[in-house]
Amino acid sequence: MIFDLSPNEQIIMDYFWERNEWLSGANMWEYFNKIGKAYDRSTVNTYLARMTDKGLLKKDKRKYIHAFTKEQLAQKKAEYILDTMYDGSLSNFLSALGGSKYIDTNENKELKEYLKNIE
């Protein structure tokens, strides 16, 4: 799944989201060194290239930027899980999520309100 991030990919995405600007491989290499991860420049460039291939980053010449906001990526992950594990069915997902647990009154109200608002 393209949405699974290794720990280093997560660090890269978090940094892109924090900075919210085009960054070079050198910028990322400097950041990794700053946080105590002394990787070769080629290793950092390999991460950036793989993340571009996965569609997580966009590249323009020698600079990169995130392809999705943090919220957009979370939504894409959720949609992927819903589609691949629950046949796109929200009811199947909620049944699996709840398992044998009953929904309390407050959760029931919140869920009904949410479903009412998406109709």
Image (cartoon, grey):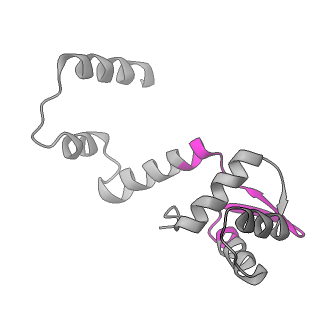
The image shows residue 36, relative to residue 46, as above or below, that is above
Asked whether 54 falls inside the magenta stretch, the response is yes
Residue pictured at 20% horizontal, 46% vertical: 96
The x, y position of residue 26, in whole percent, is 84, 70
Left or right of residue 66, residue 103 in this image: left
Q: Residue at x 25, y 40 (%)?
A: 94
In front of the other: 2 or 6:
6
When asked about the image quadrant of residue 33, the answer is: bottom right
**In the picture shown, does residue 117 fall above or below 49?**
above
Viewer-nearest residue: 108 or 16: 16
Number of on-image labels: 0
Q: State which region is magenta.
A: 51-73
- 70 relative to 89 in the view: left or right: right
In reply to whether residue 16 is colored magenta, the answer given is no
- Residue placed most toward the observer, 92 or 74: 74
Q: Residue at x 62, y 69 (%)?
A: 54
